[in-house]
Image: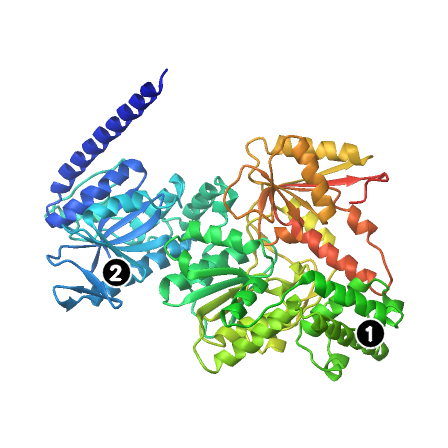
């Protein structure tokens, strides 16, 4: 068939769709004309929205506004794009937004905006029972007979012809069962208004009711009130909505909120706050929704920071999917990336050169470390490089007297004074050699940024209204002080999110060391695991059960914590083999078999760069598509994710494969003074990798490894 035939078919289909839309529009107009209590403008707008009900949307018209004596909500619309609270206006004058205010006919009309925002907040509170995030509830002011397309804060201003296309172009948030659950709850929370011209409008129930309808009939058909003795089952609706979301790709499932989480998103904090909790409790999800919530309701920018450099890309994508209207007002950065930009914007030279800095340290170790008392504890210079990075420079220590008495959080080797003196000599030598080469290391970048931020704080307002810090336990003390300096103790200014059990880097700190106080109810702990089934969580906890840990609040917690589980379908598959070749073959077969429905929700996680390179070659040769986590940006991709345990932080996958997961743990040995610390750190990293799994955790191992087995 020629190209013309294909074009002809497309044209015929376009004409068919046009006829269908015209028929739907005409039917909607006939339906709307029967609503005698409505103005002509409201009928025209309603007719536009009735067309959407043929495409999975649900429309509630003229509902009572709970908490008021007689006020009504013009329309509530629920569909794939979320929830919309509509206020329909029949103004003759064209509305204008000027200097942050709504004007029409020479008068300021901000009171109408505030009323619509109040209605929207009522809907948010009602829907928090389902766990729907407040960012999924949008206020729309629709002007009959006008052509308008503008925004005023979070309120979208649209003409009657603009509202339909805008709604159809919204990204998909809710699947059909979610639409049903949300619509049912809204119908219950916003009862039928006594003057209503229509009780409910949706695809299967389009009824109209005249203003003079029998009062007894209206009471009989009205939704049950809040004191209905529990006949309205919110729990069942919530379970149905969650089950519906769980069918979607993992990127969309991450936007689900439990009512307890939704409450944290909306909460007003009087100062710095912290959200903690075990793996799988949705801390990152809360943080993303909180950032969108703050951006939606304020006029300033929001900074969202994490340690890992791959996560900001992913989190930015998630936020654009969740709330595209505010995505441009939230900056996602890794801490070091943001600090470099911050300094360069202020004309501060940043001469970051990792290779030259490492050369300076190697020379310092050769000159002053290799033959010092430090070699008695650990002859490998890496441990002492970490001591300088995480303890001395990471805590902002500038004198030996301070270092001599500092408590070295999460550092296991006991250092006597002679050892600390040797460390300090190594540090001073390194700093001299680094300065001679005219380069900075990553710790220097944070220290310089802190100095500038503290100076600016005394002179000018912060460029950010709020800062959200994810995986805070992996930051250094200087890094946390830097972010605190941006917003200070302002209400809703600083939110710290993290869990000490998931710290995957050496060193640590306490919040009190940074001058941050989260007392007074500003420290919240999430205790419900939404990701892991009992078999998966038990397998992960077995790795760290004996490792008590100190969190950033200074409290020591047992490695085995009690959590409430909500997901029960996940399973653990242990695959042990005699040779590395057999193990790798079974891994490929497992990825093919379990991911037959699609590779986008599968991840192979490894403990080292060498292992990543090996399994990238293996999977590619087997014809399996691969996406390295360092390149993953959060958009659905039909490929197996591949990366390190550390890169997987903040992410989750339906299927997680950990090849030879126990080999590195058994093989990691070293000096008795530092080996336990190394072992514990690796166990935490493995724990993080295992808890990324939702439906399947595949644990591969080799009983008798050959010469080429050490990865």
Q: Which residue is located at x 77 percent, y 80 percent?
A: 404
- Earlier-in-chain disc, 1 versus 2: 2
Outermost residue on the top side: it is 1
Find residue 613 and report its image quarter. top right
Outermost residue on the bottom side: it is 401
Identify the mark at residue 706; answer none if there is no mark: none
**Secondary element type, mark 2:** helix
Identify the mark at residue 116; answer none if there is no mark: 2
**Secondary element type, mark 1:** loop
Q: Local crowd at mark 1 within 10 Å, few (<14), some, or many (≥20)? A: some
Identify the residue under disc 1.
415
65 horizontally vs 257: left or right: left
Find residue 642 and report its image quarter. top right
Q: Which residue is located at x 26 percent, y 56 percent?
A: 150
* Count of residue discs: 2
356 horizontally vs 326: left or right: right
């Amino acid at each position: 068939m020629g190209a013309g035939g294909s074009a002809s078919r497309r044209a015929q289909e376009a004409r068919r769709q046009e006829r269908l839309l015209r028929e739907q529009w005409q039917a909607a107009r006939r339906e709307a004309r029967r609503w005698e209590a409505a103005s002509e403008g409201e009928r025209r707008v309603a007719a536009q929205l009735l067309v959407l009900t043929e495409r999975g949307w649900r429309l509630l018209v003229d509902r009572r506004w709970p908490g008021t004596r007689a006020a009504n909500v013009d329309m509530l619309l629920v569909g794939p794009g979320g929830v919309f609270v509509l206020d329909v206006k029949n103004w003759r004058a064209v509305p204008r937004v000027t200097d942050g205010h709504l004007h029409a006919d020479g008068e300021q009309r901000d009171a109408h905006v505030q009323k619509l925002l109040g209605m929207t907040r009522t809907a948010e509170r009602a829907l928090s029972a389902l766990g729907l995030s407040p960012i999924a509830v949008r206020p729309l002011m629709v002007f009959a007979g006008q052509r308008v397309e503008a925004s005023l804060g979070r309120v979208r201003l649209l003409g009657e012809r603009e509202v339909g296309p805008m709604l159809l172009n919204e990204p998909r948030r809710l699947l059909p069962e979610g639409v049903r659950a949300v619509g049912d709850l809204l119908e219950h929370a916003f009862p039928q208004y006594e003057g209503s011209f229509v009780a409910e409008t949706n695809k299967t129930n389009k009824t109209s009711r005249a203003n003079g309808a029998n009062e007894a009939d209206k009471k009989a058909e009205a939704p049950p009130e809040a004191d209905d003795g529990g006949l309205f089952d919110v729990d069942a609706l919530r379970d149905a909505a969650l089950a519906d979301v769980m069918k979607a790709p993992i990127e969309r499932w991450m936007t689900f909120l439990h009512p307890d989480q939704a409450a944290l998103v909306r909460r007003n904090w009087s100062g710095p706050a912290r959200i903690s909790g075990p793996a799988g409790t949705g801390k990152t999800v809360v943080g993303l929704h909180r950032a969108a919530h703050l951006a939606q309701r304020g006029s300033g920018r929001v900074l969202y920071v994490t340690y890992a450099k791959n996560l900001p890309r992913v989190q930015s994508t998630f936020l654009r999917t969740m709330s595209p209207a505010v995505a441009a007002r939230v900056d996602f950065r890794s801490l070091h990336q943001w600090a470099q930009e911050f300094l360069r914007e202020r004309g501060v030279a940043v001469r970051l050169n990792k290779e030259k800095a490492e050369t300076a340290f190697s020379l310092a170790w050769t000159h002053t470390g290799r033959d010092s008392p430090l070699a008695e504890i650990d002859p490998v210079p890496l441990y002492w490089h970490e001591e300088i990075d995480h303890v001395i420079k990471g805590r902002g220590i500038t004198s030996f007297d301070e270092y001599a008495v500092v408590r070295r959080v999460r550092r296991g080797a006991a250092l006597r004074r002679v050892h600390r003196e040797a460390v300090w000599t190594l540090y001073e030598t390194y700093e001299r050699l680094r300065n001679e080469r005219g380069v900075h290391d990553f710790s220097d970048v944070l220290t310089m940024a802190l100095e500038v931020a503290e100076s600016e704080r005394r002179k000018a307002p912060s460029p950010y209204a709020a800062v959200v810090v994810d995986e805070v336990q992996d930051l250094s003390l200087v890094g946390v002080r830097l972010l605190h300096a941006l917003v200070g103790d302002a209400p809703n200014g600083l939110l710290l999110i993290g869990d000490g059990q998931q710290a995957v880097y050496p060193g640590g700190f306490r919040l009190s060391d940074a001058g941050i106080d989260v007392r007074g109810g500003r420290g919240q702990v999430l205790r419900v695991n939404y990701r892991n089934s009992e078999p998966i969580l038990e397998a992960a906890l077995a790795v760290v059960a004996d490792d008590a840990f100190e969190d950033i609040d200074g409290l020591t917690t047992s490695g085995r914590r009690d959590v409430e589980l909500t997901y029960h379908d996940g399973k653990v598959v242990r695959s042990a083999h005699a040779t590395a070749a057999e193990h790798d073959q079974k891994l490929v077969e497992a990825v093919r078999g379990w991911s037959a429905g699609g590779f986008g929700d599968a991840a192979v996680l490894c403990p080292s760069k060498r292992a990543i390179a090996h399994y990238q070659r293996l999977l590619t040769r087997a014809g399996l598509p691969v996406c390295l986590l360092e390149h993953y940006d959060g958009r659905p991709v039909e490929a197996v994710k591949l990366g390190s345990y550390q890169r997987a932080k903040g992410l989750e996958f339906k299927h997680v494969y950990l090849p030879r997961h126990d080999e590195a743990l058994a093989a990691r040995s070293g000096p008795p003074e530092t080996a336990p610390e190394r072992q514990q750190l690796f166990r935490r990293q493995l724990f993080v990798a295992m808890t990324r799994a939702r439906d399947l955790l595949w644990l591969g191992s080799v009983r008798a490894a050959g010469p080429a087995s050490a990865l």
